[in-house]
Structures are given as C-alpha cells and as structure tokens.
Image (cartoon, grey):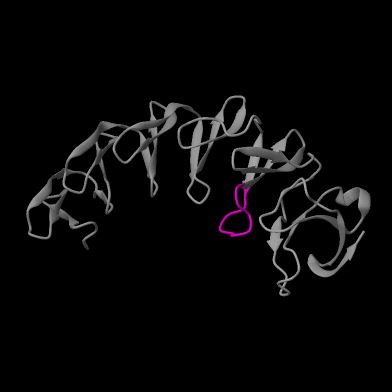
Amino acid sequence: NSFSGGIANVKLKGKWGAIDKKGDWVFLPKYAMPINLDKNLCLVFCNEKYGIFTPKGVQIKDFIYNDVVLYDEVLVCQLEGKFGAIDYQGKDLIPYGYESLIYLENKKLFIAQKSNGYQVLDTKGNPVSNLTFDDYHLIEKNEFIGKIFVIRKGAFWAILELENGKETTSPFILESPYPLSLDQSADKNKLPFLVAPAFREQHGPTYSVFVSAAPIKPTQYQLWNIEYENESLIAVDRQ
C-alpha cells in the first residue's frame, strides 16, 4: 500500500504488518487486518480489540478498546461498552462513562450522552453548559455560526450558543430544526440571518428568522416574516 506517515501496510503469508521507507518492519506481519496508518498515530486491531501506537511502533495504549475514532487532536475510545477520550500521548481526557461521545473539531467541544440526556463538555471533560437536552442538530462548516447548537427538550427546539464561557439560549419554540440554515446576503452591509420553522402551523406560510451581526447571538434576535413558495425564499418583510 502507499506510505502514510512514513510507513506502509504490507501483507505477507496472509498477515498484515507495516514497513518504513527503508523496508524495515515497524509492525511485524501478524495481524488479520491492515493497520490504520496516520501521520501521528496508528490503530492496530488484534483479537477483536484496538491498540494505539506511534508511527515508529511504540505502544501508547494496549489492545483494550472495542472501537477508536481518530480526530486531529483527540481519540474517542470505547472501553467495555462506554465511551471516553484520550489525547495523542494517551492521557485520559474524558472518563469512560458515556453512552456516546462525539468530538466537534471546529468547536473543540464534546457532545456526551448519558441516560438522562446529552451535555456539552470541554476538552478537559468539564460541562460548559448547565443544560441537558434530549436531542441535538449541528450546523457544521459555517464561519458565521461559531459554537451554536440546535437542541431539543421535550417537543420543542431552541438555539444554544456557547462563547467565551457564557451560555445563551433562545426560547424553546422551534417545532423542528429542519430546514435550518444560515444565509448571507449578497449585500455585505446586510446581516446574515438564521431561518427556523417556528409555529408554522399557527402562523400559516411564514417562518421565524433570528437576525443579528455575525456571529449570531440568539438573545439579540428580531422576528421577521418570510414568505415561501415551494420552500424557496421569495420575500423578507420586517414585522
């Protein structure tokens, strides 16, 4: 296979190992599956468990994990059915006590799930919000959004923003997180606006729009009416 991080997978007599560019073995050919090679870490699967190694073959963690998800800065690992996280040196970041754990690289935050709901954690495992919620929807890859989530408690959704250690939440009035989008006007002097379907049944063919300067602050919103035709925006009028 091609080289990654200076090493390459090699199959010999039905077993997988890895060599460096000199042809020397970094991992001896004794594994049933190819090694997950990365420039910073290697995941090796053996006896139904994952171990974690450096690209030079130095073991960081033994073969103890049921699953491992590799991110740029952290690893989310499953140990005996529970999820936690470690850094690239093998130091524990998040204890193994969660039903699910997702790392948001662009936000540098975790969404952790326990039996009582979801919570947002920082990279040290500390809650950054006092809220627990039943479900969430992420708006990814948008420079205007910042650390904003759409969260649900019970039947309704709200917008949660976490910035500089402060928590801001809009009212739980949204009937659905879909369609939820951030639109930037072609006119740079106009503000971006966040579209969410609030009380659509009560108000007919209108949507609520949360408007503020980027990044959006959910508490600094104004309610606008938007007319839709076949789900396409045709007009925006200040209420």
Horizontal relation, residue 95 to residue 158: left or right = left
Q: Quadrant of residue 134?
A: top right
Q: Position of residue 217 (x, y in %)?
A: 71, 49
Q: Position of residue 23 (x, y in %)?
A: 7, 58
Quadrant (top left/top right/bottom left/bottom right) for the C terminus? bottom right
Q: Residue at x 24, y 47 (%)?
A: 33
Badge count: 0
As rendered, which of 108 and 14 lies closer to the eye? 108
Q: Residue at x 25, y 32 (%)?
A: 63
Q: Position of residue 105 (x, y in %)?
A: 47, 49
Q: Position of residue 5 (x, y in %)?
A: 23, 56
Q: Main secondary structure of the magenta part?
A: loop
Q: Residue at x 26, y 33 (%)?
A: 61
Specify whether residue 145 is painted magenta: yes
Q: Quadrant of residue 9?
A: bottom left
Quadrant (top left/top right/bottom left/bottom right) for the N terminus? bottom left
As rendered, which of 21 and 122 lies closer to the eye? 122
- First to last magenta residue range: 138-147
